Image (cartoon, helix red, strand yellow):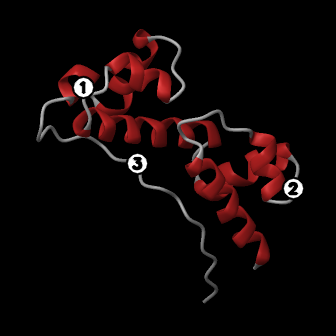
Amino acid sequence: MEWISRLNEAVAYIEQNLDKEISYDKAAQIACCSTFHFIRMFSYIADVPLSEYIRRRRLTLAAFDLQHSDDKIVDIALKYGYDSPTAFNRAFHNVHGISPMAARKQGVPMKAYPRISFKFIIK
């Protein structure tokens, strides 16, 4: 099942670059398929669109940064690819149900979207 291994390598590339720009073309190249097929295959197997997976993972890491660092909210927003604090606030609230400012408080429960990995089991 070499294709599962390649798909997991593409996910590793995505995970390593969540705080940078992610190239779908590069991820597809790692998975040895076209960008179109990579996006479709990922969405089908993971049951979540690739862009949504990346957005949820970035906001999970942003929540961790908010609770464990003294970085400004605007700096965290920029780190994870948001051009404005307003867009970051809206996306953060949609995923976690609270504002980034409220997430700064210790002990505030937030939703975490774990890293995905692919396995193929035949029974």
Few, some or many residues within 10 Å of mark 3 (<14, 14–19, 20+): some
Q: Is mark 3 on a helix, strand or loop?
A: loop
Would you say 61 lies left or right of 98 here?
Answer: right
Q: Which amino acid does label 2 sit on?
A: Cys
Q: What element carries label 2?
A: loop
Q: Which amino acid does label 1 sit on?
A: Ile
Looking at the rendering, which quadrant does residue 104 occupy?
top left
Few, some or many residues within 10 Å of mark 1 (<14, 14–19, 20+): some
* Mark number, residue 98: 1
Q: Which of marks 3 and 2 is nearer the N terminus?
A: 2
Q: Residue at x 65, y 59 (%)?
A: 45
Q: Point out residue 36 in the picture as x, y percentages from the top left corner.
A: 84, 43
Q: Earlier in the sequence, mark 1 or mark 2?
A: 2
| Real-space Cα separation, disc 1 to disc 2, in angstroms | 38 Å
Q: Which of marks 1 and 3 is nearer the N terminus?
A: 1
Q: Point out residue 24 in the picture as x, y percentages from the top left corner.
A: 75, 41
Q: In this view, does 92 lie above or below 9?
A: above
Would you say 95 lies left or right of 36 here?
Answer: left
| Residue 71 seen anywhere in this rendered image of the structure | yes
Q: Which residue is drawn at 86% across and 60% down?
A: 32
| Real-space Cα separation, disc 1 to disc 3, in angstroms | 15 Å
Q: Point out residue 76 in the picture as x, y percentages from the top left corner.
A: 40, 26
* Mark number, residue 113: 3
Identify the residue under disc 2: 33
User: Cβ–Cβ below 8 Å for labels 1 and 2?
Assistant: no
